Every structure is written in structure tokens, then in C-alpha cells.
Amino acid sequence: MDSSRTQAVERINDAFAQPAGSFAIRNARKVDARGVQDHYWLVVRNGVIAAEGAEIDTEVGGTEDMAGAFARAVAAAEAETSEASEAGASAAAADAQSSGSLPIIDAHGAIMTPGYVDIHAHGAWGASFDDGPDGIAAARAGHMMHGTTRQVLSLITNPIDTICENLRTVRALMPDRPDILGTHLEGPFLALERKGAHDPECLRDPVPELVDQLLEAADGCLRQITIAPELPHGIGAIRQFVEAGVRPAVGHCSADYQTAKRAFDAGATIMTHMFNAMNGLHHRKPGPIPAAVEDPRVTIELINDGFHVQDPMVALSFGFAPHRTAFVTDAMAATDCPDGHYLLGALDVNVEHGHARLVSNGAIAGSTLVLERAVSRAVLDLGIDPVSAVEAATLTPAKAFGFDTSNPVTGAPIGLLAAGYAADILLLDPASWQVDAVWCAGRRMK
């Protein structure tokens, strides 16, 4: 990893070691699941959005001074800061508030969105989320620099003892890393014929004893697990995981329509990267996709890179399940890296033109996508409504785990730019939709 990336990792680590900030941003074009708002501003207090609104332009017929509501919100935040300091706030917290003067950032018309939320990714910057604390820090930095402020860390199929150790590693990091939402196990409970880039020697039937072993190792950090429901113990495992507070996902499967329906009725609420590693749509063999599409309880993952799912099917998916389609990356270690040879667990992968395939059989081995690109290509290449595109990378994945309301994992909700929500904020270039500035939980990351 080059020096600039090493510095980015260190900067992020240092930022999370500091108290959440208080600041204001004005003159932005807000885009979130609630809609578009020009002349937008927000005020952040201790890492949470305290107030937000739009400055009304008197030159186009407005009735309020542009500075009015914004100035009052800033003054209120400064007063609260002063009161907290007088009540005995720590010296570090007092220093962070710039002696009571709230930092104000002019967005100069940039697009402002909530931070992106990726619920299915494996790595970036040459590192995998299975590679221990240093690997996790590097891979998270790679996604953070592209606007993914929160991430569920996907772990690949490995021997059970290795999976358990990787779960424990993530669990130990979470208290100091609010950007890590927990883990997703993509395996080992997958159908052999739909294994994709997973090691066939490590695939298992989800018998109760194995489920208990994984839950114990996770110690509450397991958010999602992909299961082929047609496995002998598949439906029973789904119920067992649901009872433990985990969201099972249907994927890497050959389930027929009725089996998929049984899985969703048993409590599965996610479809793992729809269209990939599953039987497709057929007019006489409908399979799992229609079962997911017709069920309003199910969040549908979609890899919008134009390779895993070609553009006509991406557009079709938005028509299938409005407000339930979540962009995911399924990103591997080669993300944001040059083409070449990489490892996916113990499996050799070649990346050519940004496309990752197993050396052994040519199977697709994850992606090199970042959510920044998934959103920008949806808007700029496919003509998808910006509100819908942003929703698919923010509120929809947050909703899949209940993170859009107050919860024990994120504390303040995430997924919107709204009062009471965590200050996960992006500023984007209006022409390219590239991420220029990133805040996570009120801390500046980029």
C-alpha cells in the first residue's frame, strides 16, 4: 500500500479516536430518499444533525432573509456548546468546538447526500475483511474514501474455525469503529452448484450445532448470513438465526419458488445479489427471484457495475421493487487497485479490465465496485432518478437492519439527512457525482 493510502488509514484511525464534531454546512443541493432541496443547510452537534433546512433566495421571490433560519440554528448550537463547556465538558471536547465558534463550511452548490451504506462487500485496497485488524482498516479506508461511511463486513467461506476467528476479530474492533456495522457471512451454507467463488471444500449444511457455534463466536456482531434454503437444514437454520436477531438472506441457491417463499415466511428478509449465483427467471420455473420481488418484507441486493448485472436488468430491478433495492458492491481486495493476481481466501483470482474471475474455472469472483460508482452510473449512465439512486445506497440498506431508527449499533439513525440522524454526510461533484468530502458520525474523513 502506498504512502498516501497508509496516511488515509492513519487519518481515519485518528479521527475515530477523537470526539464527534460540531459544525455547519450551507449552500448545498441535498439529495436523499425524501427528495431534492436546493440552498440546503444543516447544523451538526456532537456528531448528530441538530437542525436542517433551506435558505430561501429573496431574488426569486422568497420572503425570508437567506441567513435567518440558518443563523439561528448556528447560534443555538454555539449556545449549547458554551453551556456544555461551562458545565464541565472535557478540555478535549471544548478544544474541538473552536472556543465556541461553530465551523461553517460553504458547499458552493455541491450535491450533499447521506453517507453510503454497503451491506455486502469483502475488501478493497489489496486487503480483505478476513485479513485481521490491519486488513480491515485498509479495506475500510478504501471504501470510506469513496463515500461508504458504514459497512457490514462480508466474510467469505472458510473452515468453520477460521470463520469463527474472523467473527471474533470484527467483534473486537466494533467498539472503536462506528463505521463497522457488523458482519455478513456469505457462506458456508451455500449450494454447491451455485458456489460461485467460494471454496467447495468448506461448504456445509447448516445443522443446529454449526449455527450455534457461529452465533457464539459472533457475540452479537452477525447481521446477515446467506443461506441456500433448499439445503436439508436450510429452513430450520433460517428460523434459528432469526431467533438470534440475525437477518438471513436467500442466495447462492437453486431454490424453487415455493422453497424461497418458505424461506421468507421463516424470516429471511434479504436476497443476496439478485440474479447472481441463483437460478434465473423462467416462465415455467419462476425460482427465488419472483418470491423475493413480490414480498414487501424483502430487501433486494443489486450489484450495479454493468458486469454482474447488465444495464437493462438493473433498470428492470428498480421497477420490480421500488424502495427495496439496495446497491451493494460485493467488492473484493482488488477494489481500487490495478489489474493483476489476487487471492480470495485461498483461491487464486485474476483481475482484467476491473473484472475479477477465479483462475481455476473463470467464475466471477466478486467485483471491484465502490458505491460511489454504483450511484454515479445509475444517475449518469442509466438515467435513474437521483433520489432513487441515492436511496438505494443509503436509506434502503439502512432499513434492512433497522438502522434507520435509533438502535444499539449506530445509536442515532442513519440513511437520511434529517434532524436526529447521525452526521454521515457526503459532498459530491455535481457533474461527475464523485465524492469530494466525507464525514462519518460527525468526524471528517476526507
Image (cartoon, rainbow, N blue to C red):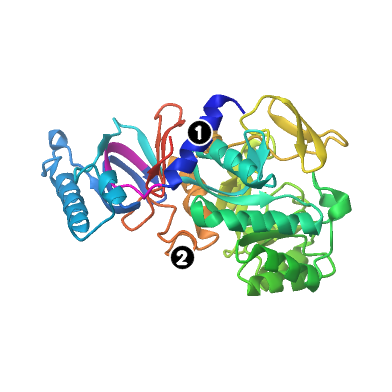
Where's the N terminus, which quadrant?
Answer: top right
In the rendering, at what x and y percent does residue 146 appear?
A: 51, 35
- Label whose residue precedes the other's in the sequence (2 or 1): 1
User: Residue tagged by mark 1?
Assistant: 8
In the rendering, at what x and y percent does residue 121 appear?
A: 63, 45
Above or below, comparing residue 321 to residue 209 in the picture: above
Q: In the rendered structure, are the residues bearing label 2 and label 1 in contact, judged by CB atoms less than 8 Å apart?
A: no
Which label belongs to residue 154? none
Point 25% across, 39% down: residue: 103
Queried whether the magenta region covers residue 388, the answer comes back as no
In the rendering, at what x and y percent does residue 54 appear?
A: 23, 44
In the rendered image, is residue 86 in sight?
A: yes
Q: Based on the displayed image, in which of its 4 quarters is residue 71 positioned?
A: top left
User: Residue tagged by mark 2?
Assistant: 407
Point 43% across, 34% down: residue: 446
| Span highlighted in magenta in the image | 18-30
Left or right position of 287 against 221? right
Q: Nearer the viewer, mark 2 or mark 1?
A: 1
Left or right position of 320 against 287? left
